């Protein structure tokens, strides 16, 4: 049971502005937005978007890991191997049950080489060979490629034929590049990162399998996104002696809706737990929020006061607000971090197991109308209109309706 200090309950009452965000359970769902505005509202409450492409019990994703196995990855390699070995189970635990996984990188269990243990891999990495590590029945394939420092995108594009049809048809495909260096593609080098990304994207779109397996693919990066420990401050030292910012992956992730996790933030390279939490967990959430009903909603308005979260199937509500996921505990509700509203873990798990309904997230906001709203006077929450003299009342004359002074939303 949470304390009152960490939990907020809101009775049903009249608030001055609301925006409704509807997320429907369907093969592909798009958001519908409606808004009502009253005299004391500063515009609408903002907007959000969320889409997912599977229903509970049939959630599929294609995962392609491209791991830089050059010598400069020496300090990251062990953490990467350990992290990948738990990534798959953690992702399946969210409800994404049908995974088709491909790993590109030099095969092995030491140095900078990579391998994935069972149950995904076909044999324990300590004894596995390039042949026994394959596990087609478990939908896992390892492609032995000596991925160079600048060649992640090039090596992936050149092995699309090897990956072939071992993907979920029409499933969402997520590419994860793990590298400590910059990216080249074709004749596009450091001086033209946009050109490198554009060339790679065009090459994938031109591949015969694009429409079936790579349509609207999402590029993610575990890379060095900055050069120094403190962004822009060379005096703070490089976070890696070999670091080179991977700008094409940064551009590609932004273009496709992926996430980039900065290896500068992975402080202890010998700590696989830190690697999973900081580098892999955000990608797990990106995959889950795309192929399952989303548990994260961007665009919470700055004037946000509180929200209601309702499952339309049986009108169950999750209206309690908590400080963070830890304070949620096993209770239902939501919490807000920055401009994102997150469903509490228990609520997230519950709605992802429901069918025949939709999640409605309603934002409630309160603010005074700015002075340039077209009304004669600036207004406060205490303002009311006088219906008897609506034609001469200087308090928003043309919008004065009823005894409460509510406006009709045409400010």
Image (spheres, rainbow, N blue to C red):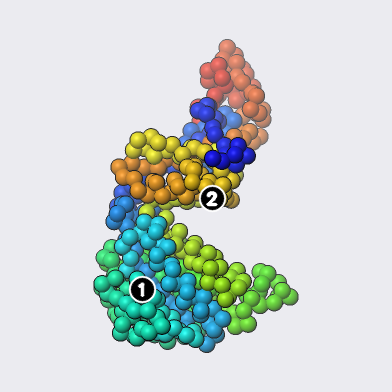
Question: For the point 52% across and 87% down, which residue is it?
Answer: 71
Q: Earlier in the sequence, mark 1 or mark 2?
A: 1
**Residue 174 percent location from the top left of the image:** 39, 67
- Callout 2 environment at 10 Å: few (<14), some (14 to 19), or many (20+)? some
Tell me the quarter of the picture where residue 52 sits: bottom left
Question: For the point 31% across and 45% down, which residue is it?
Answer: 355
Question: For the point 66% across and 77% down, which residue is it?
Answer: 238
Nearer-the-camera pick, 81 or 186 = 81
Residue receiving disc 1:
118
- Callout 1 environment at 10 Å: few (<14), some (14 to 19), or many (20+)? some
Tell me the quarter of the picture where residue 210 sits: bottom left
Nearer-the-camera pick, 241 or 316 = 316
Question: For the point 45% across and 47% down, which residue is it?
Answer: 346
Q: In this view, does 234 lie above or below 29?
A: below
Where disc 2 sits, the SS reads helix
Where disc 1 sits, the SS reads loop
**Residue 109 percent location from the top left of the image:** 44, 83
Q: In this view, does 136 lie to the left or right of 226?
A: left
- Can residue 60 be seen at all in this image of the molecule? yes
Nearer-the-camera pick, 287 or 385 = 287
Residue receiving disc 2:
325
């Amino acid at each position: 049971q949470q304390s009152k200090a960490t939990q907020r309950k809101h009775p049903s009452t009249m608030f001055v502005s609301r925006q409704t965000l509807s997320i429907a359970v369907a093969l592909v769902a798009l958001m519908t937005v409606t808004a009502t505005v009253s005299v004391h509202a500063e515009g609408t409450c903002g907007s959000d978007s969320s889409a997912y492409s599977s229903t509970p019990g049939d959630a599929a994703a294609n995962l392609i890991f491209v791991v830089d196995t050059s010598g400069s990855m020496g300090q990251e390699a062990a953490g990467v191997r350990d992290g990948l070995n738990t990534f798959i189970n953690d992702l399946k635990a969210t409800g994404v049950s049908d995974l088709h996984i491909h790993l590109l990188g030099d095969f092995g269990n030491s140095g900078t080489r990579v391998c994935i243990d069972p149950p995904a891999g076909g044999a324990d990495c300590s004894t596995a060979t390039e042949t026994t590590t394959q596990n087609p029945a478990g939908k896992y394939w390892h492609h032995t490629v000596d991925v160079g420092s600048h060649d992640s995108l090039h090596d992936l594009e050149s092995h699309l034929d090897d990956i072939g049809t071992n993907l979920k048809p029409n499933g969402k495909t997520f590419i994860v590049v793990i590298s400590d260096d910059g990216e080249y593609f074709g004749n596009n080098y450091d001086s033209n990162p946009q050109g490198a990304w554009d060339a790679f994207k065009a090459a994938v779109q031109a591949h015969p399998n694009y429409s079936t397996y790579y349509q609207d693919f999402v590029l993610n990066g575990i890379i060095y996104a900055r050069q120094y420990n403190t962004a822009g401050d060379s005096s703070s030292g490089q976070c890696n002696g070999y670091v080179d910012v991977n700008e094409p992956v940064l551009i590609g992730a932004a273009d496709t809706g992926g996430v980039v996790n900065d290896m500068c933030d992975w402080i202890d390279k010998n700590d696989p737990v830190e690697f999973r939490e900081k580098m892999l967990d955000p990608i797990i959430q990106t995959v889950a929020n795309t192929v399952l009903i989303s548990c994260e909603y961007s665009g919470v308005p700055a004037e946000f006061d509180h929200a209601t979260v309702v499952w339309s199937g049986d009108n169950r509500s999750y209206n309690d607000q908590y400080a963070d996921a830890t304070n949620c505990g096993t209770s239902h509700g939501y919490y807000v971090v920055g401009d994102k509203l997150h469903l509490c873990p228990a609520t997230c798990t519950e709605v992802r197991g429901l069918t025949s309904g939709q999640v409605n997230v309603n934002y409630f906001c309160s603010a005074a109308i700015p002075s340039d709203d077209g009304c004669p006077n600036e207004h406060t929450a205490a303002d009311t209109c006088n219906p008897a003299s609506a034609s001469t009342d200087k308090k928003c004359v043309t919008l004065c309706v009823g005894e409460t002074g509510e406006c009709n939303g045409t400010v």
